[in-house]
Image (tube, helix red, strand yellow):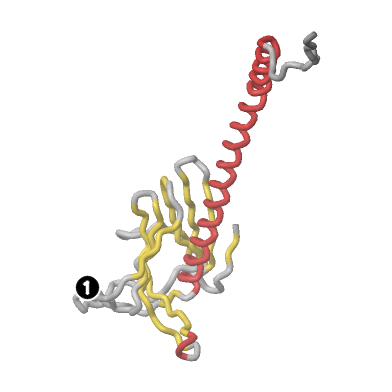
Amino acid sequence: MAFRLITNRKRSGFTLIEVVVAVAIFAVISSIIFPALIQFLDARERILEKNHQVTELQKFFLYLERDLRFASNRLGKDEYGDALKSAMTVNDGSLFELTAVYPDLRMSGVGVPRRVKWELIDGHLIRTQYPVMDPDGDTRVNKRAFLEDIDDVEIIVHYIEDGRSSETKRWSESKKLPDLIQLRLEMKNKIVYERHILMLSGATSD
């Protein structure tokens, strides 16, 4: 007589109903989580962009304040050897152009005059520095870009004359420097930054 062994083995896997239910649950969860995830990523991107802009803004003001702090009323020369009409120009072909006397640590802190120019080009603030006060066509140039997406730059020059405070949007004096620079940056996203920079002490106020 032959005997047959009968075992009760459970089948592995999922039934069609279980699969349909799982897919439905996943779809519901996804419809809730994905929009929130997208919003989180968008917010994170905006925060990183804002932090980058603030960092670049701080660098820009640091360089500009240093240039204005060490500004000198010494008249430089152009590439043809002719004396410039003013020690510092504002809103005259460029935002700023001036001679700054920076202390050089390699020369025991002796001041070295250098020509500096700031321009707004294609939404960027461009700082051009020459290693000498009287650059010519062969002088080495150091350029650096700050910020981006700048829509407009407004500069107001404040100075004291005859005991009274006056202001102008251009500066071309040959023997004196302004007392205070008011700078207003408007970004393409309509955010506005404003800064007041004192020329004499180098202090600033917001």
Give neighbour class at mark 1: few <14, some 14-19, many 20+ (Cα, 10 Å).
few
Question: Does 112 appear above or below 37?
Answer: below
Pinpoint residue 112: horizontal percent, then vertical percent: 41, 83
Question: Does 106 appear above or below 102?
Answer: below
Q: Which residue is mark 1?
A: 137
Which residue sits at x=45%, y=79%?
102
Which residue sits at x=46%, y=70%?
67
> Which residue in the rendered view is the most extreme toward the left?
80
Residue 108 visible here: yes
Residue 141 location, quadrant: bottom left
Judging depth in this view, the residue of 8 and 84 nearest the camera is: 8
Judging depth in this view, the residue of 25 and 11 nearest the camera is: 11
Which residue sits at x=47%, y=65%?
64
Q: Is residue 17 left or right of residue 134?
A: right
Q: Residue type at mark 1: give it.
A: Gly
> Which residue in the rendered view is the most extreme toward the bottom?
108
> Which residue in the rendered view is the most extreme toward the front?
1
Residue 171 visible here: no
- The N terminus - image quarter: top right
Pinpoint residue 152: horizontal percent, then vertical percent: 41, 48
Residue 28 location, quadrant: top right
Question: Does 13 appear above or below 104?
Answer: above
